[in-house]
Each structure stands twice: as structure tokens, then as C-alpha cells.
């Protein structure tokens, strides 16, 4: 699975190259750097909002150890890396929860790359992977303060669902029925049904 798109507007320029989303080994050094950036971003926002400070390096290390991403490997998971040219722009993971359901994990777009199509490309790749497993829906959990992510999910058809997991950083539960449509929500039999 490889998704390639030329990004509109400011997120990608011809000099940077096309936006690609491909499966990538979650245990690789490059994945570790992107996952550290993801965790630092969401943890700093949490600590700033609640404690008025950023996250200490030892807290990042502890969180990485307590909540590893080692389940994002085949056959029941995949880690996806988005790149603009050769530069990592973000990541997402998806894992199979059951025969019908896949879960989105570790969705992240580098702040400088937000608003340029990277998040949409990652969601499309997540949904493609879930459909490849035969999943009928994708679910996720997030926080109220992650407004950019929640806006992206809403724009792509994710709506509130009943809580399916609980934790100290879980405040919002969303899901999307995949149906027979395309990853971007267009019905398969619609005017743009060919992909």
C-alpha cells in the first residue's frame, strides 16, 4: 500500500516532493523519532493545559515505555509514515480490534505540515488498511483539547460513539462506518466512484 498525492497550498512544494504514505517498520529509528515527536506534542499540550508546563524528558521516556507501539505490526496492525519528499511529515497506526473493527492509533501530523493534506492522506491509508482486513468500521479515542485532530476526523465522517476503552487521557470516542465507499467518504457508486 502506497498513497501518493501532490499537496495543495503551503504544506508541500515541488521542491519538497510528493506526499507519500507507506507502511513502515514501527521499530525503526525513523519511526521512533516521529513517535517521540507525536508524544511530545500531545503530552506538552496536556501538561501545559493542566499544569502550566511542558513535559520533562523523563516523562516522555516513561510514557513511551508504558504505552509502546509494538502492536502496530502485521498481521493485525500497521504503522504508516507520511513523507513530503524525503522528510517525515506525520504518522498513523491502525490495529485490528476484532473481525469487524479497526482502531486508529498514533495519528500525528508535524505542526508545520498541518492543513496541507497530510492528515487526510493518513486517514485514507488507515481506512484502506482496515478495509484490507475486512473491517467495517474504524474507531478511535482522543482528547477534547486536540481540536485540530477532532476537526479532521469530523471532516472525514467520524462521529461520536459509545466509549469502548477508558483511560486518563481518553475523553472523546469517535467512529466511522466504512461501508462500500471510498476512503474519502465518496460512495463507490457516486460520480467519482472509480479510484
Image (spheres, rainbow, N blue to C red):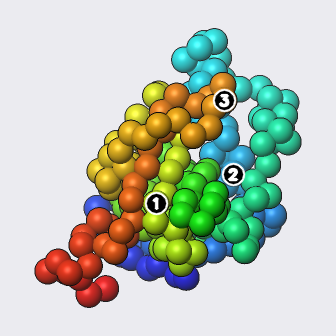
The quarter of the displayed image where residue 96 is located = bottom right
Taking the image as shown, residue 165 lies to the left or right of residue 72, namely left
Taking the image as shown, residue 186 lies to the left or right of residue 87, namely left
Q: Residue at x 57, y 40 (%)?
A: 164
**Which residue in the rendered view is the most extreme toward the top?**
51
- Tell me if residue 49 comes above or below residue 170 in the rendering: above
**Rendering coords of residue 28 (x, y %):** 79, 66
- Which residue in the protein does label 3 denote? 167
Q: Residue at x 39, y 76 (%)?
A: 5
Q: Residue 154 got which mark?
A: none
Q: Work out whether mark 1 precedes mark 3 in sequence or the reverse, and give the earlier one.
A: 1
Q: Residues within 10 Å of mark 3 (few under 14, many from 20)?
A: few
The quarter of the displayed image where residue 89 is located = bottom right
**Rendering coords of residue 82 (x, y %):** 54, 66
Gap between marks 1 and 2 measured at Cα: 25 Å
Circles 1 and 3, Cβ within 8 Å, touching? The answer is no
Q: Residue at x 52, y 68 (%)?
A: 135
Q: Work out whether mark 1 precedes mark 2 in sequence or the reverse, and give the earlier one.
A: 2
Quarter the C terminus occupies: bottom left
**Rendering coords of residue 138 (x, y %):** 49, 57
Q: Secondary structure at mark 2?
A: helix
Q: Secondary structure at mark 1?
A: strand
- Which residue in the protein does label 2 denote? 35
Q: Nearer the viewer, residue 168 or 9?
A: 168
For discs 3 and 2, the disc positioned in front in the rendered view: 3
**Rendering coords of residue 141 (x, y %):** 54, 41
Q: Residue 137 got which mark?
A: 1
Gap between marks 3 and 2 measured at Cα: 20 Å
Q: Residues within 10 Å of mark 2 (few under 14, many from 20)?
A: many
The quarter of the displayed image where residue 27 is located = bottom right
Amino acid at each position: 500500500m502506497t498513497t501518493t498525492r501532490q499537496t495543495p497550498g503551503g504544506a508541500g512544494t515541488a521542491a519538497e516532493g510528493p506526499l507519500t504514505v507507506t507502511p513502515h517498520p514501527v521499530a525503526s529509528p525513523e519511526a521512533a523519532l516521529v513517535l517521540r515527536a507525536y508524544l511530545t506534542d500531545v503530552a506538552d499540550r496536556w501538561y501545559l493545559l493542566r499544569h502550566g508546563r511542558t513535559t520533562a524528558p523523563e516523562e516522555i521516556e516513561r510514557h513511551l515505555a508504558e504505552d509502546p507501539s509494538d502492536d502496530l505490526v502485521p498481521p493485525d496492525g500497521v504503522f504508516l509514515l507520511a513523507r513530503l519528499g524525503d522528510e517525515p511529515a506525520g504518522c498513523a497506526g491502525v490495529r485490528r480490534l476484532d473481525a469487524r473493527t479497526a482502531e486508529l492509533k498514533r495519528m500525528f501530523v508535524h505542526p508545520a505540515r498541518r492543513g496541507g493534506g497530510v492528515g487526510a492522506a493518513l486517514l485514507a491509508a488507515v481506512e484502506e488498511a482496515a478495509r484490507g482486513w475486512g473491517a467495517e468500521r474504524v474507531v478511535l479515542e482522543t482528547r477534547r483539547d486536540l481540536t485540530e485532530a477532532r476537526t479532521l476526523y469530523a471532516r472525514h465522517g467520524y462521529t461520536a460513539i459509545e466509549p469502548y476503552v477508558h483511560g486518563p487521557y481518553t475523553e472523546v470516542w469517535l467512529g466511522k462506518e466504512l461501508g462500500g465507499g471510498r476512503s474519502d467518504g465518496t460512495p463507490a457508486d457516486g460520480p467519482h466512484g472509480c479510484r
